[in-house]
Image (tube, rainbow, N blue to C red):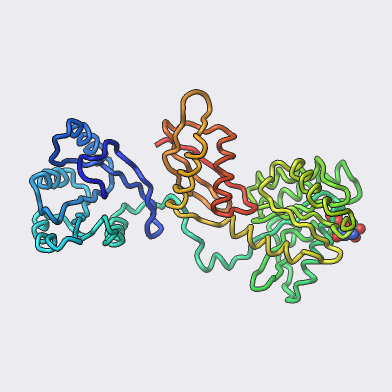
Amino acid sequence: MTSVAGTTRDVLARPVEWQRRVFTLVDTGGVVGASEDPMWEAVANRGRRAAGAVDLVVFVVDGREGPVPADEEVARELRVRGVPVVVAINKMDDHRARDRVPEFHRFGFEPIVEIAAEHGQGIGDLLDEVVARLPAVPMAAPTIAEEGEAMVEPAIAVVGRPNVGKSSLVNRLLREDRMLVSPIPGTTRDAVDEVMRWHRRRFRLVDTAGIRRPGRVAESGKVETVSVVRARHAMEQADVAVLVVDAVAGVGRRDASIAGEAAGAGCGVIIAANKWDLVKGRGPDFAKEFDDRLREALKFADYAPIVHLSALTGERTERLLALIDEVDAARRRQVTTGELNRVLGHATRTQTPSGVGRGSVQIRYGVQTGIAPPIFTLFTSRGARLHFSYERFIQNRLREAFGFTGTPIRLKVRGR
Ligand code: GDP
């Protein structure tokens, strides 16, 4: 929009977000303009082609100069195309432009917005006019949850292999909740959910009956299989899963398979290392060594925060509740397209994208296309897929930049 006609050689496309609408802004690089530049004809053609496929044209004119023959030419072409037009009279910071405004009315386009692009003046008004005229398509990214929706309590699944202390933890959480809330029917047959309060928040504990009536008889075999299936059901309904592990017994294969299910279900994950009261005397390095071993064993959930707690004494259960709140918020977080592309730009400059197979890949831009869990659609050159390790890299950068604590992040790759 701010480029001077004829000076940009490429057609640039940028995602823009305004008033919860996401649209792509195409810089035509100057459709026409007085220029001796031999590149001009090529640039102008490319600009025309780009303008042919758009939903709306922002027709930028120079207020200081007034209408020039080239403007007439553009106006004629736009009228033929019948595409909606918003006229932006630029350089309105110059007093000479004042008197020339009425002259632009003869093009017959409405509305006319006065801007000073260099000073950012009138840009908000211009975007308002643009957004008001966009075709009524469902927006790419979902809107932020409405007030009413935000009142729905997040569903929490407490999962883990037998004897790690799930039932003790649920009892502890419900006991500390002094406001009694009666059990409500869960979504699975014979399952009962219980709602608990924490400060001004409410959390729904999924299938507390299933947690309290676990198959703790067998360490392996049938009963355990039932409990894994039950855990999977709970996680599919959950916003956040608390994966309880045993600080004394350590972490093994069965904990890992439940962690993998959690990541697949798309819920947030917190790892609660329970029975911490029993390992407190083990010296200063124990916590770090424990966490290292846990990270090694639970690779699928490397984004999950760890909390060392005791269901028996209640130590750090408060911290767990704060984490549940944080992870639930992170999972629903929506970032603006501008912020997202700033982070993507920085990431791709730090590390050049690697694709699958030969040839280089460019990430042109990204848009957040979903929440709970966050989904990002990245538009790449030729629609090429990204290498697995590069997707990991991007996910980690997004996590750092936006604090997506404990939530899986999904990436989709598209061509444009
Ligand atoms: P679940 O099968 O995962 O529901 O485990 P339970 O809640 O039934 O606990 C299994 C055993 O571990 C019981 O004997 C509990 O008393 C004990 N336990 C649970 N949490 C703690 C804890 O934080 N510290 C200690 N020392 N023991 C615990």
Does residue 381 appear in this view? yes
Residue ID at (56%, 57%): 332
Q: How many marks?
A: 0
Residue 179 sits in quarter? bottom right
Q: Is residue 360 left or right of residue 134?
A: right
Residue 129 visible in image = no
Apparent side of residue 115 relative to residue 206 in the rendered image (left or right):
left
Q: Residue at x 50, y 34 (%)?
A: 353
Residue 22 spot, x, y in % from top left: 39, 52
Q: Is residue 210 left or right of residue 336?
A: right
User: Vertical placement of 4 versus 201: above or below?
Assistant: above
The quarter of the image holding the C terminus is top left
Q: Nearer the viewer, residue 299 or 167?
A: 299
Q: Quadrant of residue 96?
A: bottom left
Q: Does residue 382 sit above or below 209 in this rendering? A: above
**Residue 364: x and y, percent?**
42, 39
